[in-house]
Image (cartoon, rainbow, N blue to C red):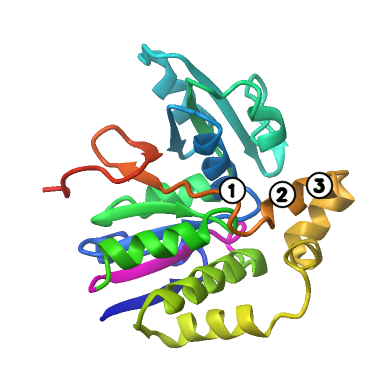
Amino acid sequence: MGDIHVIFKKEDIKEELMVGKVAVVFDVLFATTTITAALADGASSVIPVYDAAHAEERAKNFSEPYILAGEDQGQVIEGFHHPLRTHLQPVVKGKHVILSTTNGTVALQRSSQADRLYASSLLNNPAMAAFLSERHENDTIMLVCSGSSGHYTLEDFYGAGSLIHYLQEEGNWNLSDAALTAWLFYKGNHLSEADLLCESRIGRILLKAGLNRKEIEFAASEGLFHTIPTYDPISGQLKEGDYESRKT
């Protein structure tokens, strides 16, 4: 029987304690939603980076077709593609997406010492639960909520609770208090997924700034894809499926 823990925000990640663990990162609005959708839409990979400078450095010696996408504090980075699926879907097929976001890609980088690292969202939680139950049923799984610039976020905690719900349907797991709280929150919510995300602090900020509600409704589409974004520590890329060998 495996263990499930929840980390509330990326600033709480202790990188040395990720060694030997399985990490699943959430940034529902929107980095891990974008990653899941990009791979489902045919991107060759998504490469999460810390910031725009790291993205541009990574691109310098990249020989395969790629695009730069990203935001910083909610603003599209100059010279980069808008990181929402609406903007990326027409251009990602067959390309690598070098992605920089304020929270989600940073959380992925900080979690990269884990033996296995995945990105999840409401879009792919049911498939991720089935995958984790098959591959990691006796492992310790750390569900990492990216949060927002040092603060806990409701939507990531809800995303973690959603994954725990589907994991519980697959088998028995030992839940930490934080994991149990996330699961109970998910089960006890009476709003629609879209309404919940819109009522979150980040959701309200985005809508007030002019974001189309349909973008949040898409992020709330639970179980839309079967994509399993998997981090390869050798290449630094998230790709569909599992890489062959553990880090040494």
Residue marked by disc 1: 33
Q: Are marks 2 and 3 in contact (CB under 8 Å)?
A: yes
Q: Nearer the viewer, residue 88 or 15?
A: 88
Magenta run includes residue 36: no
Residue 103 location in percent, x, y?
56, 50
Which region is colored magenta? 138-150
Q: CA distance from mark 1 to mark 2?
A: 9 Å
Residue 218: numbered disc:
2
Q: Which residue: 64% across, 29% down?
A: 89
Label 1: state its secondary structure. helix
User: Which quadrant is the N terminus positioned in?
Assistant: bottom left
Q: Quadrant of residue 138?
A: bottom left
The residue under the point 85% across, 44% down is 212
Name the element at disc 2: helix
Q: Residue furthest left?
A: 248
**Distance between the alpha carbons at the discs numbered 2 and 3:** 6 Å
Residue contact at pointers 1 and 2, CB within 8 angstroms: yes
Secondary-structure class at tag 3: helix
Q: Residue at x 81, y 55 (%)?
A: 205
Amino acid type of the residue tagged 3 in the rendering: Lys
Q: Image quadrant of residue 60?
A: top left
Q: Position of residue 92 (x, y in %)?
A: 56, 24
Q: Earlier in the sequence, mark 3 or mark 1?
A: 1
- C-beta proximity under 8 Å, tags 3 and 1: no
Q: Where does the image place residue 199, in percent across and percent down from the top left? A: 81, 67
Identify which amino acid the numbered label 2 is placed on. Phe
Q: Point out the residue furthest to the top here.
A: 63
1 vs 2, front mark: 2
Q: Amino acid at mark 1?
A: Thr
Q: Which mark is residue 214?
A: 3
Left or right of 191 on screen, residue 98: left
